[in-house]
Image (cartoon, rainbow, N blue to C red):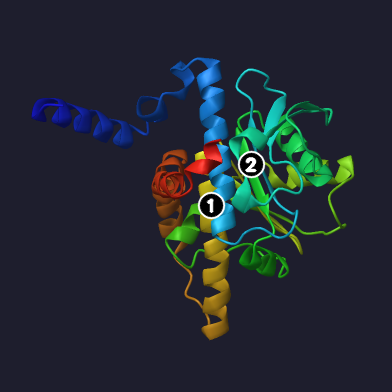
Amino acid sequence: MTTAEKNRKKTDIDAAVLNGDINMLFGEPTLPPEQVRDERKRKLTAAFRLFGKYGFDEGVAGHITVRDPELEDHFWVNPMGVSFKQMRMSQLLLVNHQGEVVEGDGYLNGAAFTIHSHIHKTRPDVIAAAHAHSVFGKSWSSLGRFLDPITQDACAFYQDHGLLDTFSGVVLEMGEGKALAKALGDYKALILQNHGLLTVGKSVDEAAWWYITMERSCQAQLMAEAAGTPILIDPQVATRTRAVVGTELAGIFSFQPLYSVISNEQPDMFD
């Protein structure tokens, strides 16, 4: 690539970033469905490996899903009993909204179906959703509180996350799935009291990044409150900050270095 071509490409990227043009940067809508599906499954598998690397796994608890680009009432999900750390692209299950495994071998986690089917039904804008029982997320959830804007990173969730302030046990009943989806509303994230965190996005990149940074924000607030009384960021400043760090574009971009590293470290996941 010539210097002129590099400069032109940089100018295009700069313009896309400034304008928040997701399609210009990533172009998924222009790809054939089979390529979109392959890319979504690659990102989904990478998200599992990252969650495993960061210690978000807890036995068979936790699941990430991505909507199929053609069968929009179907989603891809991890089979029950396979470690996040060992997830392979070939092991993913394709499930419909009736709970039937349409493609893939393995067992479907009942809670995964109950939670994610309702999210994908009620939020057509959601392409991917992530839920796990990570240590700091479930610790914070036991307080039954919203996250406060005490750091720049936490501002991504300022007035953009919900709280399900009841706990009825493992989410297996369809009514519980509906209550969860209702509590999520139009937000990007949800704190499930006594349970953990859930995040959504218009891509696996976004949903996975929101989960990772929300988990860290829970950790930061727990540590800050253990040391003293955190200073809250001014509401207007928090709102302006969210407009920078809490956008779809910010979520996608923030995931890219993590995806690059895990893809190079663990290429076997794409088998």
Task: Specify the label residue 256 is tagged with.
Answer: none
Of helix, strand and loop, which one carries label 1?
helix
Q: Amino acid at mark 1?
A: Leu
Where residue 24 appears, as percent x and y from the top left, is 35, 25
**Quadrant position of the C terminus in the picture:** top right
On screen, residue 43 above or below 234:
above
Residue position for label 2: 129
Regarding residue 158, the answer to whether it shows in the image is no
Residue at 53 percent of width and 81 percent of height = 229
In front here: 67 or 45?
45
Image coords of residue 151 (percent x, y): 45, 65
| Depth check, front residue: 104 or 50 | 104
Q: Nearer the viewer, mark 2 or mark 1?
A: 1
Q: Measuring 52% from the left and 70% from the top, which residue is drawn there?
A: 220
Residue on which disc 1 sits: 50
- Whole-number angstrom distance, CA of label 2 to CA of label 1: 15 Å
- Side (left or right) of 7 relative to 103: left
Q: Can the viewer see residue 175 in this picture? A: yes
Badge 1 density bin: few <14, some 14–19, many ≥20, Cα 10 Å: many
Element type at mark 2: strand
